[in-house]
Image (spheres, grey):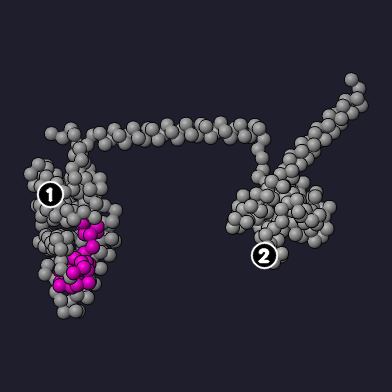
C-alpha cells in the first residue's frame, strides 16, 4: 500500500471520528437544551410555592429559580409567566441561561464568543456563580471506580466483622459487676490485689459510689502510692478543700452537704493524712500519664494556693495536704498493673477463669 493512500485513509478516519465526537456532543447538548420547558415549568412551580434559589444548589434548577426571582422583582413582584407566554427576548434569555448551566466548558466558551459583550458579561457571571454540568467519567474509569467501591465495601464489611468478633470474644471472658455492688464485693470476695485496686480509679466518676470505693482503696496499707496520686489527679481537690473548710461556693442546691460531698472530702483527708505519715510504702507501679513530676508539682502548687486563699478568708483545713506524696520523686523503676480484672464505665469486669 502506497504511503499517500495510507495517509489519506488516516485523515479520513480521524475526520470521521472528529465529526462523530462533535455530533455526540451536539446531541447531548440538544437533549439538555430540550429540557428547558420542563425545567422552567418546574422552577416556576417551585417559585410560586415559595421556594428560592440556593447558593450551592442543584443545577440548573437553582439557576432558573434565581433568575425567576430577579424576573419577578423586575415585573413589580408579579408571578413569572408560563413558558409559552414568554416574549422572544425573554425566551432567548432563558435559553442562554439554560445553555450556560448545561454546556461543557469547551461548548460554553465557543458559544460565548458569538454573544454580545453585555451578554458575555452576564452569562460569564452566571457560569461563575452556578458552574457547569458535572464532568462525566469514561466507561473504563467508571467501571474501575465501581469495582474499587465494591472491593472497598467488602473489605470494610470484613474488617467490621473481625472487629466485632474480637470484641465479642473479649467480652465473653468477663462477668460484669455493677458499681453499686463493688464496695461490698471489695470487703468480702475480692482478692487483696493492689494492682486491681489501681484499675478501679478508671471507673465512671459520675457514680456516687466511686468515692466510697476509692476511700476504701486508699485506706488499705498495701495501696500503691501511684494509685493515690492518680486519684488526686482525677478528683477536684480544690472543691474538696473549699467544702472541708466550711466554704459554701460548691455546696449543692439547698446549702447542705450531701453524701457525695462528705465522701469526696473524706477521700482527700485520708490521702493527706497517709501522705504526711509516709504510710504509702508501696511504690511498685509506674506513674500514669497525668502523674508526671511536672503534673504533680502543678497540682501541689494549686492546692497550696487554694489553702492560702482559704486561710486568708479566716478558715482552716481540718486535715493536712498530701505534700510529701506529691513532692516525692518518681521511683527509677516501675511496672504496669498486672491483673486479669478490668473496668468499663460503671462496671468491674470479673474474669470468668478467676479461681
Quadrant in the picture for the N terminus: top right
| Residue 49 falls left or right of residue 292 | right
Q: Is residue 82 magenta?
A: no
Residue designated by label 2: 77
In the rendered image, is residue 44 in sight?
A: yes
Instruction: Give how far across and how far down residue 194 sits, in percent.
Output: 15, 47
**Label 2: element kind:** loop
- Depicted 148 relative to depicted 307: above or below: above
Q: Residue at x 67, y 59 (%)?
A: 79
Comparing marks 1 and 2, which lies closer to the viewer?
A: 2
Instruction: Give how far across and how far down residue 45 sits, in percent.
Output: 64, 52
Q: Dividing the picture into quarters, in which one does residue 73 lie?
A: bottom right
Residue designated by label 1: 183
Q: Residue at x 76, y 55 (%)?
A: 86
Q: Residue at x 19, y 45 (%)?
A: 178
Q: Residues within 10 Å of mark 1 (few under 14, many from 20)?
A: some
| Residue 179 falls left or right of residue 148 | left
Q: Which residues make up the magenta segment?
A: 229-254
Q: Which mark is residue 171?
A: none
Amino acid at each position: 500500500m502506497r504511503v499517500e493512500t495510507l495517509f489519506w485513509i488516516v485523515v479520513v478516519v480521524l475526520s470521521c471520528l472528529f465529526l462523530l465526537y462533535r455530533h455526540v456532543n451536539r446531541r447531548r447538548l440538544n437533549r439538555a437544551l430540550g429540557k428547558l420547558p420542563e425545567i422552567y415549568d418546574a422552577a416556576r412551580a417551585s417559585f410560586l410555592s415559595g421556594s428560592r434559589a440556593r447558593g450551592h444548589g442543584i443545577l440548573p434548577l437553582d439557576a432558573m429559580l434565581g433568575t425567576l426571582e430577579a424576573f419577578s422583582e423586575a415585573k413589580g413582584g408579579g408571578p413569572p409567566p408560563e413558558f409559552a407566554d414568554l416574549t422572544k427576548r425573554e425566551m432567548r434569555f432563558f435559553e442562554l441561561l439554560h445553555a450556560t448551566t448545561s454546556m461543557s466548558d469547551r461548548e460554553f466558551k465557543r458559544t460565548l464568543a458569538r454573544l454580545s459583550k453585555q451578554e458575555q458579561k452576564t452569562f460569564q457571571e452566571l457560569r461563575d456563580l452556578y458552574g457547569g454540568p458535572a464532568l462525566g467519567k469514561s466507561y473504563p474509569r467508571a467501571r474501575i471506580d465501581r469495582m474499587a467501591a465494591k472491593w472497598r465495601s467488602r473489605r470494610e464489611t470484613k474488617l467490621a466483622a473481625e472487629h466485632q468478633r474480637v470484641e465479642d470474644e473479649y467480652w465473653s471472658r468477663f462477668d460484669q459487676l455493677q458499681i453499686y455492688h463493688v464496695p461490698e464485693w471489695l470487703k468480702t470476695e475480692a482478692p487483696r490485689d493492689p494492682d486491681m485496686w489501681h484499675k478501679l480509679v478508671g471507673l465512671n466518676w459520675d457514680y456516687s459510689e466511686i468515692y466510697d470505693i476509692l476511700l476504701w482503696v486508699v485506706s488499705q496499707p498495701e495501696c500503691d502510692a501511684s494509685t493515690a496520686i492518680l486519684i488526686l489527679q482525677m478528683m477536684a481537690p480544690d472543691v474538696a478543700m473549699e467544702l472541708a473548710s466550711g466554704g459554701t461556693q460548691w455546696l449543692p442546691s439547698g446549702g447542705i452537704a450531701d453524701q457525695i460531698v462528705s465522701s469526696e472530702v473524706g477521700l482527700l483527708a485520708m490521702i493527706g493524712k497517709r501522705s504526711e505519715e509516709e504510710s504509702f510504702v508501696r511504690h511498685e507501679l509506674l506513674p500514669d500519664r497525668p502523674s508526671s513530676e511536672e503534673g504533680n508539682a502543678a497540682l501541689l502548687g494549686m492546692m497550696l494556693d487554694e489553702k492560702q486563699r482559704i486561710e486568708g478568708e479566716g478558715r482552716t483545713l481540718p486535715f493536712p495536704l498530701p505534700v510529701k506524696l506529691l513532692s516525692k520523686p518518681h521511683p527509677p523503676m516501675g511496672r504496669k498493673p498486672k491483673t486479669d480484672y478490668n473496668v468499663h464505665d460503671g462496671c468491674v469486669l470479673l474474669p470468668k477463669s478467676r479461681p
